[in-house]
Image: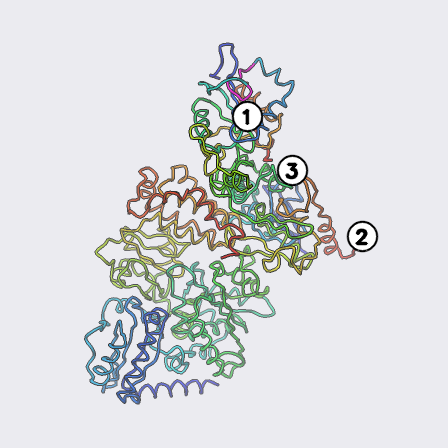
Amino acid sequence: MTVRTLTLDGEPVSAREDETILDLCREHGVPLPTLCHLEGLSAVGACRLCLVEVKGSPRLQPACTLRAEEGMEITTSSDRLRRYRRQLVELLLAERSHVCAVCVANGRCELQEVAAAVGVDHVRYPYRHPVTALDASHPRFVLDQGRCILCTRCVRVCDEIEGAHTWDVAGRGAGARVVSDLASPWGRSDSCTACGKCVQVCPTGALFEQLQPAGGGVKRREFLTFRTRAREQGPWGR
Amino acid sequence: MNAEGLQELAEREGARRGALRHRVSVCSAAGCLSLGAGRTREALTRAVADAGLGGEVEVHGTGCLGLCHAGPLVQVASRQPDGQVDRCLYERVDAARAARLVRQHLQGGAPLAEGRVPLDDPFFARQHKVVLQGSGDSDPERIESCLAAGAYQALLHALTRLRPADVVAEITASGLRGRGGGGYPAGLKWSTVQKAAGPRKVVICNADEGDPGAFMDRSVLEGDPHRVLEGMAIAGYAVGADQGYVYVRGEHPLALTRLRTALEQAERLQLLGHRILGTGFDFRVDLRIGAGAYVCGEETALLASVEGRRGTPRPRPPYPAVSGLWGLPTLINNVETLANVPTVIRDGGRRFAELGTAGSRGTKVFALAGQIARTGLIEVPMGTPLREIVFDIGGGIPGGKAFKAAQTGGPSGGCIPAQHLDLPVDYESLIQVGSFMGSGGLIVMDESACMVDLAAFYMEFCRDESCGQCVPCRAGTAQMHALLQKLTHLEATEADLAQLEELAGLLQATSLCGLGQGAPNPVISTLRHFRGEYLAHVRERRCPAGVCRPAAPGAEPSAAAARGGAAPGAEAAS
Amino acid sequence: MGALSPAGRARVATVWLGGCSGCHMSLLDLDERLLELAPRLDLVYSPLVDAKLFPEDVEVALVEGAVCSEAHVELARRVRARSRLVVALGDCAVTGNVSALRNALGGALPVLERAYLDPGNLQPQLPAAPGLLPRLLDRVLPLHQLVPVDLFLPGCPPHADAIHAVLLDVLAGRRPALQGKVRFG
């Protein structure tokens, strides 16, 4: 395996060929906000928060899908990037119904944290207040579309880790939404194994356990690190 | 079938044609069919049979004849005693006119005066047909008819006389650029796929044309499907692929039927499939039908759709040329690009490059639509001035109104205002004035059009067609559309206008795929050329064109805008 | 600093629009720090003091709550016109928050119907007292969507420490810097 050298915000760093720019940022403690990315799942580059500047490239690239190349010069933070990140978070907050005060995820919500991290203290875009559905048909879990940011972590974890592919996305544009099976109620899903992985990876309060009080419950994601390590290093259960 | 067989079939069809006195081609493209070309054809066939002309007259369908506003169109090719072929074109041929046509022209030998279109009109004289060569002459439903016009000769030439690298070299020499919108050099793409390593390779024809007002690719597929299939096979040979897919929109049923027929006929004659034309080259073509999502015209979304997944784009790199369908090196070209290929190979790349401008070789097909006298399908050399396209070929603006702007490039494109009418239409010039070649939709607007309203229309299109995956496109187009709606309701403030421009910059810079990156273009381009019109909406609460009005009372605008945002869950019911 | 009372104290106002008064409770949570602040400011208008009209020449106005009714619109505009620094205090003022949940219902009438007719009272009727009851807006707005806001202090409620920091900065004539110290919820 070859090793590449490149610069990250001016600092020389080395990278394995399978490493992404986001991996390098995490390794070197460079703060970079992410929402759709989750270690252990495939990267889709959808939330656009981890966009970075690559010298010589006219387009911004998502760090989560961008492989390290020899001689790359990466800038993770600039006036423009900071402005874009704030705008993106504002767009997300205005899009559906993100009311922290009445949310189960209040205090441990990644959207809430990212908003604070990128400096969003108010949203300049008009709130859209769409009518959204809530699926409480499952005996253990609930899906509140109003809090969903369409990061598709649930879709990916169900497909890639659990192997059930209960979740997918239906609809287009602002009407896009995660659906279970062929858009039937979650409680009637034949493929759902009720493993709860989707709930554990959800960055917001869109997927949560029934009877959970606001701000209660901590996400348990050990299974992802366990799987990732096992896949990378071979031996199981060590 | 081998090379001799191909020659023999073509000659036999040529001889059969030579024995005819008149060949009557009825336009059977979607436009004319919707105007009743089917009945016209029946009436002609019946009248010919009744007149006992069955032996010397053939009535058949053909591809788009161009003058779509005046259909059904019928072309009569008559062989003169000296062997010359005289052509007459008739417009608006209904059953009654069809009967008179048979009686007077075919029987009496005197062409009708009524409904006859002069063929020396600039509409025809200024066009140059490469891609549309066979449209309007051959019968797309009979391969023999196409073979007589030279179909698959270029494939035969490539397979028997050229090495794959030579084919790529010819395409490179031709200067052909992608006709789907981006204008990426075809030769470069082909050579990338040729050099990419993979156990197999794939050629995909992108026929997911979905720009509002655009019907170039659909017309090519309806009028000359074999040209596209031949282009695909040549591409397959050049890059080393043995499998091709045509990704067609389900909304184009006629194109689909014609393609199916063409595929069957080509396979039967061993022009596709195993050991093509008796050589060692295998190339199979399958159809994949899209469900009408605009985003599936984006190549990575198209790949996902062909693979049977939800059609959403993914970040590039890796580019499909290196890792495409199922990770295989994949050549994706648009219909019109592939339809140019047989001509490039037949005439040679250098000859092809003689046409057009330095950066944009060859011709471009345009679908003329909007406020223009002759809506229809045209093909002109690259670099033809916009004025010539709109006024000489398109017949100008009806109703004595003034030209205001032409929109090219669809929802990712922009407007060309009147002061740029003398602009040569090619890739670079269009970009210079803030527009974009796009796939070839050309919508003409007269003075009664409001450019803010136009921008709102395209933004609504992008909002509805966003795949919903990335945040700037999904949420940004919704916000931009709401702002544009405030403008068209004459309620917007200068702060709203500033926010609109700020969002435009965000979407361009941060969206995942071309749809989101291009979505603000109509706004940016109309702001560039018609900022005064925007300001009138804001400062004077007035629409200079008189199109925009305050929202109807009762419909509280902001709440209406919120409901317009296609509530999740609402779609399941629709 | 201009808006000082004769005694040299800053003229401070707090305003209660459509909110639960939790932000004002958080203000009271300053506890003993209130005693430190008291000599340095005059609370010229507040639900906590007896002032009927919003006065002129206010240095800083802390506004709790979203804009929900015509009365709120009127008051918010007056606050803006008469205050040097307008602070959106808490999530309702900043985002609409719980007060704006009703926006998804589409307008004022469906909200009133949901509250007064749907529950099935014996004599269902919509409240109507023109001139007495302010009309509800069809759409609840965060404060900055109606008038310019100088400073945002999100939180449901904002922490007393954050309010304290803002007041200290304002009294010292500094522009408060809150980035990274506050979050929604």
Q: Determine the secondary structure under disc 1.
A: loop
Query: Residue B365 location, x and y as percent?
Result: 36, 65
Q: Quadrant of residue C182?
A: top right
| Disc 2 residue type (three-letter) | Arg
Q: Are marks 2 and 3 in contact (CB under 8 Å)?
A: no
The answer to whether marks 3 and 1 sit on the same chain is no
- The magenta segment: C40-48
Asked whether residue A69 appears in the rendered view, the answer is no
Left/right of residue B411 with respect to residue B58 in the rendered view: right
Q: Which residue is mark 1?
A: C176
Q: Earlier in the sequence, mark 2 or mark 3?
A: 3
| Disc 3 residue type (three-letter) | Gly
Q: Chain of mark 3?
A: A
Q: Chain of mark 1?
A: C
Q: CA distance from mark 2 to mark 3?
A: 33 Å
Left/right of residue B191 with respect to residue B12 in the rendered view: right
Q: Which residue is mark 3?
A: A107
Q: Is residue B423 magenta?
A: no
Query: Residue C183 location, x and y as percent?
Result: 59, 34
Q: Which residue is mark 2?
A: A238
Q: Are marks 3 and 1 in contact (CB under 8 Å)?
A: no
